[in-house]
Image (cartoon, rainbow, N blue to C red):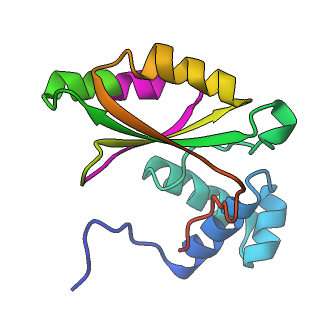
Amino acid sequence: MKDSTLPSLDPLDRKILACLQKRGNISHAELAIEVRASQASCWRRIRALEERGVLGPTVRLLDREAVGRGLDVLCQVRMKAHDLDARHCFEDFARQHPNIMECYSMSGEWDYLVRIVVGNVQEYEKILMQEILAQDVAASSSHFALKCVKYKTDIPI
């Protein structure tokens, strides 16, 4: 039985998506050669994948060290209250904060796991003390990444 929540992707769609995840700025001509299809077919499929929400915006990835944001902090957050308003308030804060790269609502002991990038510990301390804990937060636990062992953005298809 086919899972209706999964988008139907044929082999050519999968090739296009795999290629675009690695080289988002590839021209339609180069993409056509790489996936062995016509430029027109690639263009139509990309538009259809965008319309279906499979493909999001094209972005360029930055080197965090090169722009002064080399410290990666994972912060676990436990909320004081778990009502809908408190959760929405925290999630809106996380969505709007420029240093918060990812925020996950979690099962288990902690309510949220937040990934924050900063230039140094002092910058993080200011964000934690003045901004994160100013939310309806009961407790937090911070973990500083010593090095990145693996980081990838392409999803297996």
Q: Position of residue 27 (x, y in %)?
A: 81, 55
Q: Position of residue 89 (x, y in %)?
A: 29, 21
Is the residue 9 above or below the residue 25 in the image?
A: below
Front residue (pair 120, 107):
120
Residue found at x 71% / y 75% = 37
Q: Which residues are magenta?
A: 91-107
Q: Position of residue 56 (x, y in %)?
A: 54, 46
Q: Is residue 96 magenta?
A: yes
For the view shown, which residue lies furthest in the left direction?
83
- Residue 148's image quarter? bottom right
Can residue 40 be spotted in the picture? no
Q: Is residue 80 magenta?
A: no
Residue found at x 35% / y 41% = 112
Give left or right: position of 58 versus 155. right
Where, quadrant-wise, is the N terminus in this rendering?
bottom left
Residue found at x 64% / y 35% = 117
For the view shown, which residue lies furthest in the bottom direction?
1
Can residue 157 be spotted in the picture? yes
Q: How many marks?
A: 0
Is the residue 147 above or below the residue 127 in the image?
A: below
Q: Position of residue 134 (x, y in %)?
A: 38, 15
Front residue (pair 86, 18):
86
- Residue 122's image quarter? top right
Residue found at x 36% / y 23% = 92
Give left or right: position of 18 versus 8. right
Give left or right: position of 2 versus 146. left
- Residue 32's image quarter? bottom right
Front residue (pair 145, 48):
145
